[in-house]
Image: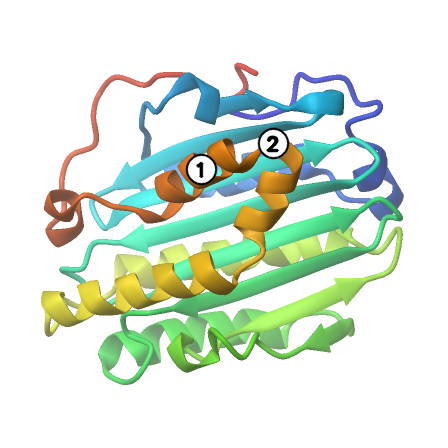
């Protein structure tokens, strides 16, 4: 699902000010996922494409593959307030791989910020830690000279250490959109070579800790609640973070039936 076919105005006003093409960025991320064997999953229609008041809309693509239990890629447009992209990729606990958490937000003045992180399993030590940290830090070191901030204190203890929060002034946001795509590319490359987990139980506990941290301290649910209502925000957060244990324990084949294809907005 994408908002590519929606009118450019007023939905893309913030993105135009920032020089960020959220549709193109979403396409690039989903192409990367499909290129690594991911397949789209069906999910409730009102979560796939949800309309709120004042022209607000959020479109979500849900995917999975042999090493990823679930990936959520969401695009938000709230006219004259903010545009945004959110990516959360949760690996199966049977492999030693962290959760990818990334978002890009453009405010109504065209200022852009991006948050990039790998958290949870493999965040402390071991072959998976070294593999992902090496790949992701390499991307961050190539980042342009932008205004940078450290990781939030509430997630830092669970982070791999390849974390960045960058900010850009109006018309400079395109660099951050490209960085989001490259960070995702590096994560998927490392995922292909990730070793087997030492303890699936420990990985599951770390995934739960990450989920609780973002639900209790993150800004996604309050922001979505303000834009679309508390009921939708709660259901969206569950779609993004809550995995059935049977899916989370071992790789599985995603369903063959796809609900809504990308670009069918």
Q: CA distance from mark 2 to mark 1?
A: 10 Å
Q: Where the C terminus falls, by quadrant?
A: top right
The x, y position of residue 180, in whole percent, is 59, 55
The x, y position of residue 179, in whole percent, is 63, 59
In this view, 76 is above or below 143: above
Residue at the bottom extreme, as displayed:
125
Please give left or right for residue 201 compared with residue 48 in the image: left
The x, y position of residue 105, in whole percent, is 69, 50
Whether the residues at callouts 2 and 1 have beta carbons within 8 Å, the answer is yes
Please give left or right for residue 200 compared with residue 265 in the image: left
The residue lying toward the viewer, choosing from 176 and 102, is: 102
Badge 1: few (under 14), some or many (20 or more) residues near its Cα, within 10 Å? Answer: many
Of labels 2 and 1, the one closer to you: 2
In this view, 176 is above or below 225: below
Would you name the residue on which mark 2 appears? Answer: 228
Badge 2: few (under 14), some or many (20 or more) residues near its Cα, within 10 Å? Answer: some
Identify the residue at horizontal 87%, vertical 60% (top origin): 169
- Say which label, 2 or 1, has the lower sequence index: 2
Residue 195, located in which quarter of the rendered image?
bottom left
The residue lying toward the viewer, choosing from 116 and 39, is: 116
Identify the residue at horizontal 59%, vertical 41% (top origin): 224
In this view, 257 is above or below 23: above
The x, y position of residue 11, in whole percent, is 77, 27
* Residue 35 showing in the rendered view: no
Identify the residue at horizontal 43%, vertical 50% (top origin): 88
Would you name the residue on which mark 1 appears? Answer: 236
Figure coloring: rainbow
């Amino acid at each position: 699902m994408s908002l590519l076919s929606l009118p450019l105005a007023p939905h893309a006003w913030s993105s135009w000010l920032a020089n960020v093409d959220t549709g193109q960025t979403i396409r690039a991320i989903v192409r990367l996922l499909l290129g690594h064997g991911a397949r789209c999953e069906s999910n409730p229609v009102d979560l796939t494409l949800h309309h709120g008041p004042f022209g607000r809309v959020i479109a979500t693509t849900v995917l999975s593959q042999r090493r990823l239990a679930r990936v959520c890629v969401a695009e938000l447009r709230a006219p004259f307030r903010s545009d945004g992209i959110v990516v959360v990729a949760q690996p199966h606990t049977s492999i030693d791989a962290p959760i990818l958490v990334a978002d890009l937000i453009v405010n109504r003045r065209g200022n852009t910020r991006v948050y990039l992180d790998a958290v949870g399993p493999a965040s402390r030590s071991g072959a998976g830690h070294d593999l992902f940290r090496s790949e992701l830090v390499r991307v961050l070191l190539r980042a342009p000279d932008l205004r940078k901030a450290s990781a939030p204190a509430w997630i830092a203890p669970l982070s791999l250490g390849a974390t960045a929060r960058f900010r850009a002034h109006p018309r400079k946001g395109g660099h951050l959109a490209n960085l989001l795509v490259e960070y995702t590319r590096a994560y998927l490359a490392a995922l292909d070579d990730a070793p087997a987990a030492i303890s699936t139980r420990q990985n599951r506990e770390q995934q739960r800790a990450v989920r609780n941290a973002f639900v209790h301290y993150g800004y996604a649910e309050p922001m979505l609640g303000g834009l679309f209502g508390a009921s939708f925000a709660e259901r969206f957060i569950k779609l993004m973070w809550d995995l059935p244990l049977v899916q989370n324990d071992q790789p599985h084949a995603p369903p063959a039936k796809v609900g809504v294809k990308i670009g069918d907005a």
